[in-house]
Amino acid sequence: MSLFNFGKKKEEEKKTTAFTCNCGCPTSEANEISNDCCAEAKDGICCIKVLGAGCKSCHEQYEYAKEAIKSMGLSVEVEYITDMQKVMEYGVMSMPALVVNEKVVSMGKVLKAADVEKLLKRLL
């Protein structure tokens, strides 16, 4: 009996990852959501996610993103994702990362609330 179970994945077990944003728009790595998919959402932003490892910097980015959304008057929920498998599905190699409408818009640095606001205004 081994201490570690390093089972190999079979071809039939491989799955294509599908993402959905809060408005229900399905997408995958090959078919990303465009900003107009959420035209019914206020100002075209339907989902915002902070990807991180749960460290202090990642948590700070989550708080700054929530603060920016609140000060902009948007009714979008900010999701904090720490599941490394989900983080890797976005192709993010340095954290924290900010995802807007299923597109990575920033990674590897903590953006203050004012910087997040500027970024979101450019994306609108």
Image (spheres, rainbow, N blue to C red):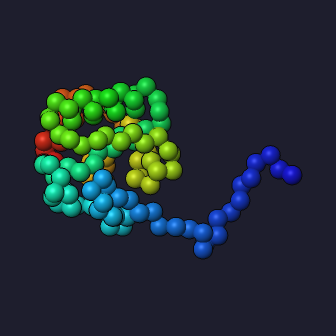
Whole-percent x, y for residue 65 in the image: 27, 34
47 shown above or below 96:
below
Q: Residue at x 80, y 46 (%)?
A: 3
Q: Residue at x 43, y 25 (%)?
A: 56
Left or right relative to 105: residue 124: left
Whole-percent x, y for residue 73 in the image: 14, 35
Closer to us: 65 or 96: 65
**Quarter of the figure with residue 71:** top left
Q: Residue at x 60, y 74 (%)?
A: 12
Q: Residue at x 41, y 63 (%)?
A: 18
Whole-percent x, y for residue 41 in the image: 18, 52
How many numbered dots are placed on residues in this image? 0
24 shown above or below 56:
below
Left or right relative to 102: residue 71: left
- Residue that extends furthest to the right in the rendered view of this protein: 1
Whole-percent x, y for residue 90 in the image: 40, 53
Closer to us: 19 or 84: 19
Q: Is residue 62 visible?
A: yes
29 shown above or below 101:
below
Closer to us: 122 or 44: 44
